[in-house]
Image (spheres, helix red, strand yellow):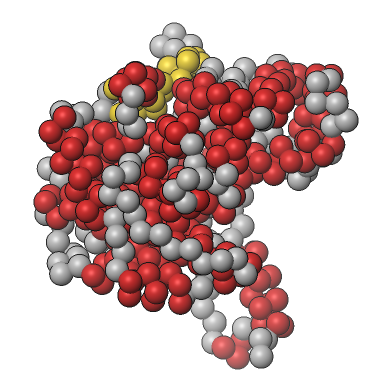
Amino acid sequence: MENTELITRLSELVKESCRLDNELFQQYDVKRGLRNRDHSGVLVGLTNIGNVLGYQKNEETGKLDPIPGELRYRDIEITELVHGCQKSGMHGFEETAYLLLAGSLPNKSDHKAFTDYLASKRDLTSSFTKNMILSLRGKDIMNILARSVLALYTLEKDGDNTSRENLVRQSLNLLAKVPVVIAYSYHAMMNAYHRKELVIRHPDPKLTTAENFLYLMKGADNYTALEAEILDLSLILHADHGGGNNSTFTIRVTSSSGTDTYAAVASAIASLKGPLHGGANLQVEDMMDNIRENLSDWEDEDEIYEYLMKILRKEAFNKTGKIYGIGHAIYTVSDPRAILLKERAGQLAKEKGLEKEFILYTKIERLAQKAFYDFKTGTDKHVCANVDFYSGFVYKAIGIPKEVFTPIFAMSRMAGWCAHRIEELNFDQRRIIRPAYKSVYTGPGYAPIDERK
């Protein structure tokens, strides 16, 4: 039986022992959340893999000037990469993963070898599927995914080998298998907890990553070419976001200790599960559901604006004062990922008969920015729609359930995580990442147990 009195007592002590006054951070110039006072990130590392730009330092004023957002993979701007893939008429996630891992785009021969290798590694053994996914129940796919990734280590003959060749092999193994683990985990969860039919399909080696995932989730004749193209686009857009985002920094920290690939990737999955990181599009969809329920006329922009102001005043939705999907830690004028996703979201809305909903999203995107500036009178902060504002709409239109939104993020970011892990373990000046913390504890010292309160 649980001792509730003990738990309450410890909770009270924890509350007091964890208190750190804001003045202490200022006194010791500690950058909370690894953020400078101007809200820019503290520079803690170098990378050749990806770069995110949303502002530039003004040398005269010392302030951060907002600029249109840029996301670069190996110095190729994301818009150029995406439009190039679309122009060629091929799915681009595989060549994006190749680019992040290898540092250059594949030629036709390399591309075929890469995609063929992934296709050959997708299948999970029947015992792994049964023991790790079907038998061990779970109500959150991210937890099942982390557990399954850790279990893949047990199938390795030399799992702790951190040679370049083994790191590459393990990375490709994860890129191939993770989408299958996610799809199987969803079906197992729905069967165990919602009495839905259990459907386990074998991956099709002729399909791309995006096509295979939709096939595993929905069946061969239950997705359209446009749905697969837009899911592929989403995978490209989420594949990396520089070394400073929480989950990528996590995998670099754990990798710097020399741990194995599967343990390091599991740590990144744990980070991404956090609602402040990977679950943002779920919050956008919850907010949009609330807005739809409370608007009497979706075309009345004055009514939309007033409801957004209520959200900012903490009078509506979840009373946090946040308009989810608007604003970003780095992007100011624009998020290139949101622009690219919005381009195709309109086409998907037309295919699915969701034009009215899509128009509502575009109105809220525009009016939310106005509401923010009106509410924060005098602010010099710039906000824009981020990729999460449209990704939930896109997934919902495709027919992907909410339980899979964040796992798709993990499926895509696997490419960037593995690239950063390989880089962390293969540059000459590497050291274990160990920042410093200063103790400011001023509590009572040691006393014999009979003298303690």
Left or right of 289, for residue 252: left
Above or below residue 339? Residue 319 is below
Q: What number of labels is visible?
A: 0
Residue 115 sits in quarter: top left
Residue at x-position 18% and y-position 64%: 160
Above or below residue 433? Residue 100 is above
Residue found at the far right of this picture: 296
In this view of the protein, can residue 158 be seen by the observer?
yes
Above or below residue 327? Residue 240 is below
Spot occupied by residue 100 in the image (x, y as percentages of width and height): 26, 36
Residue at x-position 43% and y-position 17%: 56
Spot occupied by residue 57 in the image (x, y as percentages of width and height): 43, 17
Left or right of 432, for residue 14: right
Spot occupied by residue 448 in the image (x, y as percentages of width and height): 54, 87
Left or right of 116, for residue 341: right
Above or below residue 322? Residue 120 is below
Residue found at the far front of this picture: 221
Residue at x-position 55% and y-position 46%: 400
Question: Considering depth in this image, is 242 or 192 the residue closer to the camera?
Answer: 192
Residue 288 sits in quarter: top right
State the quadrant of the N terminus: bottom right
In this view of the protein, can residue 373 be seen by the observer?
no
Question: Considering depth in this image, is 90 or 39 the residue closer to the camera?
Answer: 90
Question: Considering depth in this image, is 418 or 67 the residue closer to the camera?
Answer: 418
Residue found at the far top of this picture: 60
Spot occupied by residue 161 in the image (x, y as percentages of width and height): 14, 61
State the quadrant of the C terminus: bottom right
Residue 155 sits in quarter: bottom left
Left or right of 443, for residue 119: left
Residue at x-position 59% and y-position 61%: 18
